[in-house]
Image: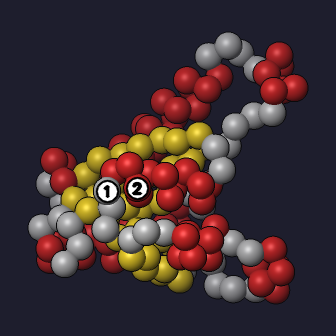
Amino acid sequence: MFKKILIPIDLTEVAISKPALDASMELALQSKGVLRLVTVETLLPASFMEYVPPEFDKSQEERASQALEQISAGLALPKDNISHAVRFGGIYVEILAEADEWGADLIVIGSHRPSMATYLIGSNAKTIVRHAKCSVLVIRA
């Protein structure tokens, strides 16, 4: 069974992640596994840096970390079995890197229902499924 389950969380659309959180919690309970919540913050272009305070990246990281802590506090798992990470960069690149570095054996990701826009543009979930070195479970909202 899966022992190390990674759940990407989009903090701007937490509702999309809720079904993935529920499914991953059930899997972790069955296998006595651990969960890792990860969110990815986008990097500001260098040309914007003169318009933001010097501690902007640090405050973004703290805000995201607090949001992940609030989400994990609502999960029915022992707190020792839940961790979280905040990464900066491209969404699927950072999720795949976190999965590799943490040694995840399953990524559970929430996804929108497919629409014409996602068929033409692509989605992060599709890229994660295609390139992950571990199993991926996509949960539709």
Q: Is residue 125 visible?
A: no
Q: Is residue 104 visible?
A: yes
Expressed as whole percent of the image width and height from the top left, the position of residue 30 reads 14, 77
Task: Determine the secondary structure under disc 2.
Answer: helix
Residue occupied by mark 1: 103
Label 2: how many Cα within 10 Å (few below 14, some 14–19, many 20+): some
Q: Amino acid at mark 2?
A: Asp
Q: Residue extending furthest right?
A: 47
Q: Amino acid at mark 1?
A: Gly
Residue occupied by mark 2: 100
Q: 72 or 36, which is in the foreground?
A: 36
Expressed as whole percent of the image width and height from the top left, the position of residue 55 reads 62, 16
Image quadrant containing the N terminus: bottom left
Q: Are marks 2 and 1 in contact (CB under 8 Å)?
A: yes
Residue 119 left/right relative to 136: right
Residue at 57% x, 76% y: name it: 130
Image quadrant containing the C terminus: bottom right
Q: How is the image coloured?
A: secondary structure
Separation of marks 2 and 1 at Cα, in angstroms: 5 Å
Residue at 48% x, 41% y: name it: 86
The quarter of the picture where residue 51 lies is top right
Count how many numbered circles sit on residues in the image. 2
Expressed as whole percent of the image width and height from the top left, the position of residue 95 reads 51, 56
Residue 119 left/right relative to 90: right
Expressed as whole percent of the image width and height from the top left, the position of residue 93 reads 59, 55
Residue 2 left/right relative to 66: left
Q: Residue 81 bears which disc, if any?
A: none
Residue at 26% x, 62% y: name it: 4
Task: Determine the secondary structure under disc 1.
Answer: loop
Residue at 62% x, 76% y: name it: 126
